[in-house]
Image (spheres, rainbow, N blue to C red):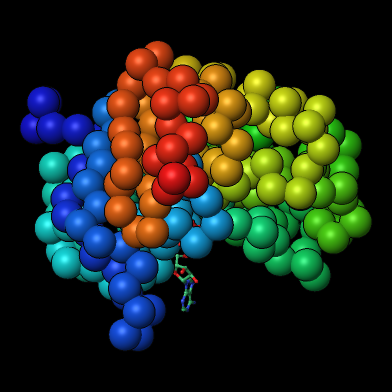
Amino acid sequence: MSDAPLLEVDALDAYYGDFQALFGVSMKVEPGQVVAVIGANGAGKSTLLKSIAGLMPSRADAIRFEGKSIGDAPAFAVVGRGIALVPEGRRLFPSLSVEENLLIGGQLGRPGPWNLERVYALFPILAERRHVPSTSLSGGQQQMVAISRALMSNPRLLLCDEISLGLAPIVVRDIYAKLPSIVADGISLVIVEQDIVQALRAANHVYCLQEGRVALQGAASSLTRDSISAAYFGV
Ligand code: ATP
C-alpha cells in the first residue's frame, strides 16, 4: 500500500440521466499534495468532486482511496473513510448557529486532531461569531464555516469546490493563506478553481478539464498561464 497514491481516479465516467458529464477522467492525489482542477463553466469540475465524495454513482474501481475501491460507496461511508467535501455554494444549515453547523461536521467523521478549538484557532472570527445564525455571516465567513465543518470530520483528503466564488479578492487571499497550514497537518487537498493564476499559485499539480475530459495536466511548476489557457478555453 505504501506506493499507492492517496486517491486514484481511473477512467471515471459520470452521467446525469442520459447526459454524459465526464468521459474517462483519470487523476491522482499523493499524500501532502494540493491538486487544482480548473476549467470553464460546465467543464465537469463539480461532477468530478461529487463523484469522489460519493454523491454520484460510479464504477467501484473508478475511484480508489488508500488503495481501496470506493467508487460505489455512499457519501456517508466516504466521509467515514476520510474524504470531506466543501460544496459549491457552501450549503450551510441556515437555521443553525455557526457552532451547530461545525458540530454537525464532526458527527459522521473520524477521530482526529480537528475539533472546535482547532478550527477556531484557524479562523478566529468564527469563535467570536460562534453563536450567531450562519446566515448572518459575510460570504467569506460562511466559506470559513464550510471549510471548518469539513475539517471537523478529520479528513485525510479535503475537496474544495470553488471556494473563491463570489468573494472579494482580499477575502479569497485570506482563505487561501490558510490552506498551507491545513496541508501541514497531513491533509491533502483537491481545489476546484476557475482562476488559473490562483490555481497555479496554490497547487503542486494541475488538471484542466474541458467538456468532461482531462485536456491538460502537469506539475504546477511546469505550467504557465499561457500554456493552460488553450486547454481551458478549448481554443
Ligand atoms: P461550474 O463552474 O459552472 O460549476 P463545472 O465545471 O463544475 O461548472 P459541472 O457542474 O460538473 O461543471 O457540470 C458538468 C456538466 O454537467 C454541465 O454540462 C452541466 O450542465 C451538467 N450538469 C451538472 N449538474 C447537472 C444536473 N443536476 N442535471 C443535469 N446536468 C447537469
Residue 30, visible in the rendered structure: yes
Find residue 32 and report its image quarter.
top left
Q: Which residue is drawn at 63% across and 44% down?
A: 163
Q: In this view, does 99 lie to the left or right of 46?
A: right
Q: Residue at x 66, y 21 (%)?
A: 177
Q: Residue at x 55, y 20 (%)?
A: 201
Find residue 15 and report its image quarter.
bottom left
Question: In the rendering, at what x and y percent does residue 12 appear?
Answer: 22, 59
Q: Quadrant of the C terminus?
A: top left
Q: Residue at x 30, y 46 (%)?
A: 214
Question: In the rendering, at what x and y percent does residue 216 appear?
Answer: 32, 37
38 up-or-down from 196: above or below: below
Q: What residue occupies the far front of the structure in this picture?
A: 235
Q: What residue occupies the far bottom of the structure in this picture?
A: 17
Residue placed most toward the observer, 73 or 204: 204
Residue 124, visible in the rendered structure: no
- Count of marks, rendered view: 0
204 up-or-down from 66: above or below: above
82 up-or-down from 200: above or below: below
Q: Quadrant of the N terminus?
A: top left
Question: In the rendering, at what x and y percent does residue 24 appear?
Answer: 20, 57
Residue placed most toward the observer, 164 or 111: 164
